[in-house]
Image (spheres, grey):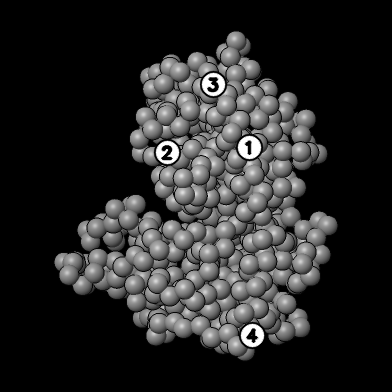
Amino acid sequence: MHIGFLNPQGNFDSGNSHITKHPDFGGQLIYVKQLAIAIAQMGHKVDILTRQIIDPEWSEFAETFETYPGVDNVRIIRLPAGPKKFLPKELLWHYLVTDWVPNILKFYQQHGGLPDAMTAHYGDGGICGVLIGEKTGIPFTFTAHSLGAQKMDKLEVTPENLPEIDEQFHFKYRILAERLSMNRSAVNITSTRQERFEQYSHQVYRDAVDVDKDDRFAVIPPGADFSIFGAKAHSENEEATYLHIQERLARDIAEPRRDLPVIIASSRLEPKKNILGLVQAFAMSPTLQERANLVLLTGGFDDPLREETSDDTTEEVLTPIREVIKENDLWDKVSAFGLLDQSQESLAAAYRFMVKRRSVFALTALYEPFGLAPLEAAVAGLPVVATKNGGPSESLQQGNKEYGVLVDPEDPADIVRGLERLLCDADEWEYFAQAGQQRVLKNYTWESTAENYLTLLEQILSSSATRSRAKLLPIHPYFGNPESQTDVFLEELGKLYFGSNQKLLSTSSF
């Protein structure tokens, strides 16, 4: 089988460059890369289709073709879309229609024919799947990873602030693209049942897809890479990573405390990750401060608690954290730094280093659609404290059986409870270290993810596969010819989001 992965946002290269430096990158890139490699290792041909960037600051993304070392049957294909420079995902919509989709079709005309099926990621990949399907009949699956309606909810969008918020995030394109993607996909793939029934049931999507129709959805969780994160794995820079961590602890932590266990958090510096809540919990518990240090792995930032960054979003996260640390005199108990590089191998080595100190991994995000990071930490042998909101409630708990400690991320006292449960009881630490690791080994592997994708695609391509769907939504004129006269009016978005009974601003206001 020949499968195309549609991923215009974020960028792929053999070195996973910039993977934590920009919000368009991160977990989605790891998901797609690992899934593509696992499918290819089963004998199938995979193309990761992404956007070409010719820019000195993003030199890794200039060549049309690239492969992963030692991996057969996977090629990264970069095709132009708009200006040569890097653009954030919010500014790509126009160029996807005018450039990227036509360039994909032209590429396959010139290079041996189209894939048998596509799998589209995020709303921008989804709309490309829609447009390619319209022209070629190639079926596609849609994996949203996250949906725009939930982000609008978190931003507390109102009729009054909608124009300002949309100016930054371009929800008027994203929401319509998501609706078309879930409506016209062969199947919508979610990581959890909660994602299906809670995210896709938002009123914004209610006439695009029916969450109660099982043949419109497939729950396929992602996996952890045991060859990298396994407790017995060993990276080329294992010892160098250990030394780097020890140097940073020596820089930041008081000498008598340097061998204590660590509460370790590793995520992008974004408000929704709620690192502040974790720091507040640490600040309010003398017990935690007595028994452990707090370590924040911060991507490309080496000393962000003491040195200001040039990124506004990052500073929005760090400023209140610095204040909590200062007000509670935590400077010799908290360390924040980036690893030697941004590879998974270095992160895995860091986890194994922390296991030796009987440390704990913490993810206190306000909402986590799936939560691959805690599963990777669990594979390495770290017991996990994670948000109860989202995917961890399924991956780390089944019935009354616990595989990690779930907490309310908006209640620092509950975060304290979860952390103290593991750090104050050796038996509890041992139980959750083993239970979490075995849970992931049994249920969350990239091989099983790939097998489920392949089974689904084979069903879709077989003549006997029939899948019901709601009435097909018309493709908005903007996605046929994105000009000013075909643009999406904010009033259209307002009606979808606020409902017909909500008093809207006048059309002229938009």
- Among the two numbered marks 2 and 4 on one chain, the one whose residue lies closer to the N terminus: 2
In the image, residue 247 above or below residue 50:
above
Residue type, numbered disc 3: Ala
Query: Where residue 299 appears, x then y in whole percent?
Result: 59, 39
Whether residue 477 is visible to the viewer of this picture, yes or no, is: no
- Among the two numbered marks 1 and 2 on one chain, the one whose residue lies closer to the N terminus: 2
- Among the two numbered marks 3 and 1 on one chain, the one whose residue lies closer to the N terminus: 3
Residue type, numbered disc 4: Ser
| Element type at mark 1 | helix
Residue 183 horizontal side relative to residue 76, left or right: left
| Element type at mark 2 | strand
Question: Which image quadrant is residue 344 in?
Answer: top right
Residues under labels 1 and 4: Cα distance? 42 Å
Residues under labels 2 and 4: Cα distance? 44 Å
| Element type at mark 4 | loop
Residue 386 horizontal side relative to residue 242, left or right: left
Query: Where residue 472 appears, x then y in whole percent?
Result: 42, 85
- Among the two numbered marks 1 and 4 on one chain, the one whose residue lies closer to the N terminus: 1
Q: Would you call the spot at circle 4 few (<14 residues within 10 Å), some (14-19), or many (20 or more)?
A: few
- Front residue of 229 and 494: 229
| Residue at the disc numbered 4 | 462
Residue type, numbered disc 1: Gln
Residue 101 horizontal side relative to residue 69, left or right: left
- Among the two numbered marks 3 and 2 on one chain, the one whose residue lies closer to the N terminus: 3
Q: Would you call the spot at circle 3 few (<14 residues within 10 Å), some (14-19), or many (20 or more)?
A: many
| Residue at the disc numbered 2 | 407
Look at 38% across and 19% down and name the residue there.
Answer: 327
Residue type, numbered disc 2: Val
